[in-house]
Amino acid sequence: AAERAPEENRLLRRETSLTSELSGFGTLKGVLADLQARSAALRNESTFTQRTATSSNTNALTATASSSAASGTYSITVDALASSQSLASGTFASADDVVGEGTLTFRFGTVDATPAVPGPQALNSFTLNPDRASASITIDSSNNTLAGVRDAVNAAGIGVSAAIVNDGGGARLLLSSIDTGAANALEVSVADIGDGNDTDLAGLSRLAFNTGSANLTQTAAAADASFSLNGLALTSASNTVTEALDGVSLTLKDMTSGTAGTLTVSENNAVARNAIEQFVNAYNAFISTASNLTRFDPVTGAGDFSARTVISQVRNAVTASVQNPDGPFGSLAELGITTSADGTLSINSERLTTALEDGNSGMISLFGRSETGIAQRLDGL
């Protein structure tokens, strides 16, 4: 035992030293991986090309902007919102009343209808929408009640919703086009197999709405939204407008009553700033952790040269200037990010704000567009 003890003690000390080194390298690898992950966002061009769309009248208009949107200020008025058509049947005693049997055929297009008031109710003309397919629904003994017709229409998934409404005098079937816009109105044709008459007010033909027979009442007309952008009159079948301004999606919510609202599209500096701040925090965490790990300990002998080499490589990757940058910035110092005495980075908030306001898209090459970009250099370690 006495002969064995010195050798065992030496091996135990070596094991302790190696365990400490392995643990240290694992910790160092972890903080380096976090730094590389934070720098990954700085390699993405989208981080520096985000846009924000701001409306001065959010009750009437909201908007979102993609990176392809051009900065600018626009005057917008909303004169009318897009709406969908609704058609109501006559009154039935209850939802269980039998309507009739046959086939209902729905087509979509633009209608010219005379409303019941002043009347007489009529569908004067119908222009087919070539982009919408027609659909037919069979009504037989299994679904020939008012509720059965409602359920059959809803189950068909043809772009028409059906509901039963009690107006105080009885049950009425309400058919509505799901899509807004003047070209998405409904025409309903009937093949009535009950009495063979497709236009009268008996059987399934009570649900007809076409130029031959307008037995349904149009309670709401289909219409396009109308609005103006910097004085230019525009229309849209939907209240969500994606084609008026490149890269901007407008949501029309209410009329502006002739008072123009202002839409401002600008660079979203918050995304780029947040990514830069997270990168600096990750770098400082790496430097702090690495400094503690490589501080020489006379008891354990820790203070590994290879670890210090990694730290030096990381420091050079982050602080060295970028050669021939595409933009105006060639180093972190030009953004107001400088190295402190302890090796960590500090941010001059005012200088960073100024750099972002000058155009954060100019920072792309500093971090990752070229092989000499900071994020690219870190990724290569």
Image (spheres, rainbow, N blue to C red):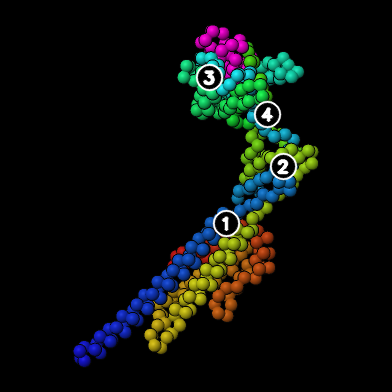
Q: Which badge, 3 or 2, is on the more N-terminal residue?
A: 2
Looking at the picture, tell me which residue is in the foreground, 306 or 253: 253
Please name the residue that numbered disc 2 is placed on.
60
Q: Amino acid at mark 4?
A: Ala
> Which residue is found at the position 33% from the left and 81% from the top?
16
Label 3 Cα neighbours within 10 Å, binned few <14 / some 14-19 / many ≥20: many
Residue 100 part of the magenta segment: no
Please report the residue visible at 71 percent of the width from the left and 18 percent of the height from the top. Answer: 116
User: Relative to the observer, which residue lies in front, 326 or 296?
Assistant: 296
Q: Is residue 105 visible?
A: no
- Residue 145 has which mark? 3
Nearest to the observer: residue 210 or residue 162 = 162
Q: Is residue 170 above or below residue 364?
A: above
Residue 345 percent location from the top left of the image: 57, 73
Is residue 16 something that shows in the picture?
A: yes
Amino acid carrying mark 1 in the image: Thr
Kindly identify which numbered label has been placed on residue 47: 1
Report helix, strand or loop for mark 2: loop
Q: Earlier in the sequence, mark 2 or mark 1?
A: 1
Going by the numbered disc 3, the residue's amino acid type is Thr
Q: If you read the primary sequence from the N terminus, does the residue marked by circle 1 or circle 3 appear first?
A: 1
The residue singled out by tag 4 in the image is 223
| Left or right for 304, reference 73 | left
